[in-house]
């Protein structure tokens, strides 16, 4: 049976914390980092990995303040990027990044910084910029305490995506929601996510894309309200990479269409010589 169908949970010390990450597949295969979105966690990839784990070594970290990684004092994009650069030091040779939403922006950061850049980057349904009104709303939300629930069932029932539109089956939503909460000492349930991480910096995707030298692909949800079609085309023009649109999905690609998304990831790996 080898490594197939086996998820391994691991932890690694980076300079400021102990990062949690999950792996699937044989470590001898080409490594692919799977980077999740803001306020999400590594478990979002669990429906994508079965289609890829026989060919690739898949590594999905929980960003600082997300999932089972600890909270931190700073949530700048450079902080996320440094954490990833330290993580990939564990793996010999080249590696690829597949990033969704904020994870894609962190991937762009890692690629543009040049410290330990990926050999190839796939950017999936990422924000292009940050309107001032939107940033102000996120910063205001970051100052609020997370909600507390009497039971895990109550917490899951109140869980909502951002943006809310999606085509994911209910059972997938419930499964990722369960891992967004932890039981407190008083028996009630609170958020794992550190809401202070909502106070993001201004997103400047075009400026970052101009600094990227590795092969870069772009994937956009056809119904996306996050990544405008013209903006995606502009990024593809800047980097010289292809742009693919996925039909029937809104933004949450790993949950809405995991098999189709995995097929694009496989094609990306083959075409960028990361077989």
Image (spheres, rainbow, N blue to C red):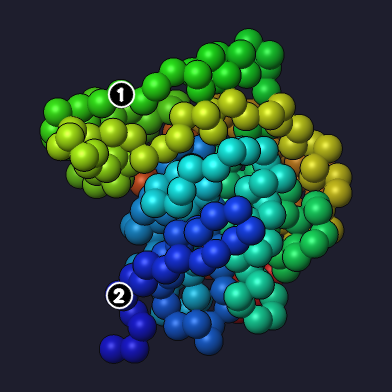
Cα gap from disc 1 to disc 2, whole angstroms: 35 Å
Q: Which mark is residue 240?
A: none
Mark 2 residue element? loop
Which quadrant holds the C terminus?
bottom right
Q: Which mark is residue 147?
A: 1
Q: Residue at x 57, y 74 (%)?
A: 31
Q: Position of residue 161 (x, y in %)?
A: 37, 30
- Left or right of residue 156, residue 125 in this image: right
- Left or right of residue 204, residue 56 in this image: left
Residue 100 in view here: no
Judge the density around disc 1: few (<14), some (14-19), many (≥20) Cα neighbours within 10 Å. Answer: few
**Number of marks:** 2
Residue placed under numbered mark 2 in the picture: 5
The one of 112 and 90 positioned closer to us in this rendering: 90
Q: Position of residue 239 (x, y in %)?
A: 81, 50
Between marks 1 and 2 in the image, the one whose residue lies nearer the viewer:
1
202 vs 26: above or below:
above
Mark 1 residue element? loop
Residue 87 found in image quarter: bottom right
Q: Position of residue 237 (x, y in %)?
A: 81, 44
- Left or right of residue 266, residue 68 in this image: left
167 vs 132: above or below:
below
Question: Which residue lies most toward the front here?
Answer: 185
Which quadrant holds the N terminus?
bottom left
Q: Residue at x 53, y 87 (%)?
A: 28
State which tag comes first along the sequence, 1 or 2: 2
Q: Residue at x 63, y 58 (%)?
A: 15
Q: Position of residue 164 (x, y in %)?
A: 38, 25
Q: Residue at x 36, y 46 (%)?
A: 255
Judge the density around disc 2: few (<14), some (14-19), many (≥20) Cα neighbours within 10 Å. Answer: few
Residue 80 in view here: yes
Residue 157 found in image quarter: top left
């Amino acid at each position: 049976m080898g490594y197939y169908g086996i998820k391994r949970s691991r932890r690694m010390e980076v300079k400021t914390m102990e990062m949690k990450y999950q792996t699937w597949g044989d470590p001898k295969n080409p490594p692919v980092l799977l980077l999740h979105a803001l306020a999400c966690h590594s478990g979002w990839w669990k429906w994508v990995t079965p289609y890829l784990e026989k060919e690739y070594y898949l590594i999905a970290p929980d960003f600082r303040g997300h999932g089972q990684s600890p909270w931190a004092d700073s949530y700048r994009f450079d902080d996320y990027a440094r954490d990833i650069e330290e993580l990939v030091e564990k793996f010999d040779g080249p590696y690829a990044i597949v990033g969704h939403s904020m994870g894609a922006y962190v991937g762009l950061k890692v690629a543009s910084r040049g410290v330990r850049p990926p050999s190839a980057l796939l950017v999936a349904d990422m924000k292009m910029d940050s309107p001032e009104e939107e940033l102000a709303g996120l910063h205001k939300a970051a100052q609020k305490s997370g909600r507390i629930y009497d039971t895990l069932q109550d917490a899951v029932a109140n869980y909502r995506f951002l943006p809310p539109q999606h085509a994911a089956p209910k059972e997938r939503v419930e499964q990722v929601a369960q891992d967004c909460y932890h039981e407190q000492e008083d028996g009630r349930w609170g958020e794992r996510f550190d809401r202070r991480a909502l106070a993001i910096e201004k997103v400047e995707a075009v400026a970052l894309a101009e600094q990227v030298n590795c092969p870069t692909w772009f994937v956009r949800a056809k119904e996306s309200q996050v990544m405008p079609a013209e903006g995606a085309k502009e990024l593809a023009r800047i980097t010289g990479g292809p742009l693919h649109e996925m039909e029937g999905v809104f933004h949450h690609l790993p949950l809405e269409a995991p098999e189709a998304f995995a097929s694009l990831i496989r094609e990306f790996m083959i075409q960028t010589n990361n077989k």
